[in-house]
Image (tube, rainbow, N blue to C red):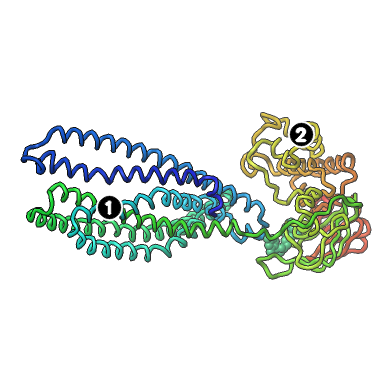
Amino acid sequence: MLRYMKKYWIFALLAALFMIGEVAADMIQPKLMAGIVDDGILGLSGNGTPDISLITTVGIRMLLIVLAGGLCGILCAAMTNICGQSYGNEVRKACFSNIMKMSFEQTDSFTTGSLITRVTNDVSQVQRLVMSIVRGLIRSSMFLIAGTFTLLSLNVHFNIVVACAFPLVILDIVFILWKTNPLFGILQKRIDRMNTVIGENISGARVVRAFIQEGTETERFDRANTELVETQMRVLILTSFMRPIMNIILNMAIVALIWIGAIQTKAGGMRPGDVMAAITYISQILNGMMMLAMIFQTFSRGFASGRRINEILHAEPAITDGPGVGETAVKGSVCFRDVSFSYPDNQAEVLHDIDLEIRPGEVFGIIGSTGCGKTSLINLISRLYDATEGTVEVDGVNIREYKLKELRDRVAAVPQKNELFSTTIRENILLGREQANENEIRAAAQAAQAEEFILEQPHGYETPVAEGGTSLSGGQRQRVAIARALLKKGEILILDDSTSALDLVTEAKIYDALDRDYAGITRIIIAQRIASIRNADRIAVMENGSIIACAGHEELLRTCGTYQDIYQSQVKMGGAAE
Ligand code: CTP
Ligand code: MG
């Protein structure tokens, strides 16, 4: 992760330099103050009368040093922020781009909630770590080291105080860090969990309301939230012990300093101003230690987050580019050879020994009961998942040979669960092919029978779509998704149950438009209604992950019992098959 810091190290360096300036100003003050008290007020170097001119000159010097220190402080904060924020920005970008390359299998195993936490909260923790290293580490170590030396330079007898106070403080810090450390990993996991519950409930709000599940879901959220709060409380309670214990030690140290100081002053080895300065130095030293403890805590939290971010950054995409294929002689063929498939997180085989050849330009229907593996089958074509056994070929070449972009450029799919984004209708269609011009967009929308309703919207193509497409009806969403796929102009068009929300007349119009304007394109149509695919060149009937028959409509009606059953059931339901 350090490589993302490369561009910003100069800001880190400047921040460190300004910090040295700021701390140096803080550290000179007690010494000067001691001079004012001893020589200016008590007149110890002279005849015992106050020296007003010395108070004025040293006072002005102190003021100037404060101003210089303040300026250094401001510049240090600015540099630290530039460095920290830019670093966070780079890491977030890198994470996001890696997530985009992940296969479904990988995103499933991370879970959406966890990915969101990692890109937001975890990156912020690492950002804090970087900022506290740049700012706090230098500040606290300077207070600690330079403070100790200055304190001892005032009077070497103070070493007893240092020797007693330090081990106690270190014990306090180590104990609390040892207790809190393991909690940080757990804390991030709890945030993951809560984000997952929130995400699921917001995106599934309609289902939750429709099934009156607000109570159950609120309980689920409460559980996740309580677990998070409990862990957070444990961290906070533990850390809350740190400062009071430090304060007790600090006050004991001050009393000891005054006691030693008094003895030394009485013996003539020290002046009262120096005792005062010593008190400020010991506070600075112990505060430096406290700050260091906090930084260690930020360290352990930052490292826990860093590990989680690294898991994203180092996740090798499970599905990667092949060497590349280039032009092929055939265009639009798909061939499955002895393909079997099971989902990575599920042992059960979903597809068994599929052998199937779809010819260029063919209109190919797939039908079968729900859950029989239709979507799983077509997902293999554009390598959303890889087949467990056997090979899939597109245009006569094993799909693993293609670069992913090359392969996916050839395949335009309308997924069963169509995703629309929260932007305009035009942008949603343009996702199909960004360079498309106005005429092409309109032609695609017209073929998908979408233009009519789009033009009826308040701003036509510029009408914004709500997140997930919820501002459109199910059928409208499907038609926008079809227009998007048509715009892509792939060689193979896959429609996965993409017209299920459309009436038969609209569906027929889409198919007519496809016959007319997209004739050369291979079409793979998954449907629940026989009416949607009866005109296909061939229809594959699937059952429990296998293709049990593959022929034209008429032939299937004669030879395939399952197809006849589906047909009969749809005829009975009101002629839907006709
Ligand atoms: N499945 C799974 N893991 C997934 C997706 C699906 O284990 N990530 C399983 C399902 O439980 C199902 C089988 O894979 O038993 C086939 O799913 P799918 O191909 O989606 O079935 P379809 O035939 O497309 O079903 P539908 O008509 O309902 O879309
Ligand atoms: Mg499906």
In the rendered structure, which amino acid carries the disc numbered 2? Glu
Q: Nearer the viewer, residue 118 or 222?
A: 118
The label on residue 202 is none
Label 1: few (<14), some or many (≥20) within 10 Å?
many
Q: Residue at x 30, y 59 (%)?
A: 242
Residue lying at the far front of the rendered structure: 46
**Front position in the image: 57 or 19:** 57
| Residue sitting nearer the eye, 86 or 160 | 160
Looking at the picture, tell me which residue is in the foreground, 547 or 246: 246
Residue at 59% over, 56% down: 313
Q: Position of residue 198 (x, y in %)?
A: 52, 52
Q: Is residue 557 left or right of residue 379?
A: right
Element type at mark 2: helix
Quarter where residue 441 is shown: top right
Q: How many marks?
A: 2
Disc 2 CB within 8 Å of nearest ligand 2 atom: no
Query: In the picture, residue 359 is in which quadrant?
Result: bottom right
Residue at left 21%, top 61%?
Answer: 159
Q: Residue, x 38% and y 52% (percent of image)?
A: 137
Which residue has dot 1 on it? 147
The percent position of residue 135, horizontal first and vertical second, equals 40, 48
